[in-house]
Amino acid sequence: MIKVLLNGCLGKMGHAVEDCINERENVVVSCGVDIAEGEKAYPVYTCFVDVQETPDVIIDFSNPLVLDDMLSFALAHKTPVIICTTGFSEAQVEKIHDAAKTIPVFYSGNMSLGVNVLIALSKMAAGVLSDTFDIEIIEKHHNRKLDAPSGTALMIADGISEVMTDAQYTYDRHAYRRKREHNEIGIHSIRGGTIVGEHEVIFAGHDEVVSIKHQAQSRGVFASGAVNAAVFMKDKPAGMYDMGDLLRNN
């Protein structure tokens, strides 16, 4: 039985991960951490220093502000961590990579299988089309999402940049008046209602457009990916892991 510490257990994604775990026979939530106060069937702490349990793995759907405390706990207890939170600063991402020198860290801006297929297809398309097509990314999320652009949109752009080496990310065209440069990857954010998550990559050429799109119908797809990652990461050696490693393992 794999014992999970669920960081952000009282949030919407925390509830989704808990529901997913409750459907599994090989995983259990042993405790949770959340800056809000609330009750669960398992112990819930407001900070990591109070945690009494010894989890096998941490699943993190929380807030970038909690990163330091979570990594300190994980490093002290040599606990693998699944980081699903987005919106980290460059300095925080560096801390995540530093932690991976000591403990196993699974870090992904999106835990959906379909999104990672979209990224692979976008890289393939960019390899063929980027010389003559303009590339734009549109992401849509609910009105409570704090970070923009989404971590997934940046994952897509980073993937495309692996085959389009001179790419320049452009977020805000209203701030200047000039024609679009060909090496730009436009990244646009929409926030509204209860949209779970939509990402579309547009390749616009002369008289033709190719579009690759993914829509998440529920938070369950991300929760399932996180739980699968937790099972995958138990007893792994120190290092950085992502959805590519999980997909290759399957």
Image (cartoon, rainbow, N blue to C red):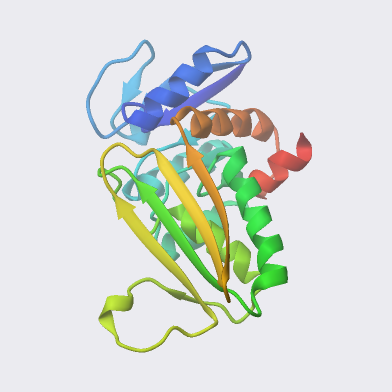
In the image, residue 173 sits, relative to residue 240, either above or below, namely below
Residue 192 image position (x, y, % from top left): 26, 45
Residue 153 image position (x, y, % from top left): 48, 57
Residue extending farthest bottom: 178
Quadrant in which the N terminus appears: top right
- Left or right: residue 35 compared with residue 136: left
Residue 209 image position (x, y, % from top left): 56, 65
Residue 39 image position (x, y, % from top left): 27, 16
- Using the rendered view, name the quadrant where residue 171 is placed: bottom left
Residue extending farthest front: 207
Nearest the viewer among 214 and 151 is: 214
- Left or right: residue 10 compared with residue 96: left
Residue extending farthest right: 249
Nearest the viewer among 102 and 155 is: 155
Q: Report the number of numbered marks.
A: 0
- Left or right: residue 3 compared with residue 73: right
Q: Inspect this view and state whether residue 71 appears.
A: yes
Q: Inspect this view and state whether residue 242 appears.
A: no
Q: Residue at x 67, y 71 (%)?
A: 129
In the image, residue 219 sits, relative to residue 111, either above or below, namely above
Nearest the viewer among 34 and 215 is: 215
Q: Residue at x 55, y 81 (%)?
A: 183
- Left or right: residue 9 compared with residue 208: left
Nearest the viewer among 240 and 193 is: 193
In the image, residue 38 sits, relative to residue 128, either above or below, namely above
Quadrant in which the C terminus appears: top right
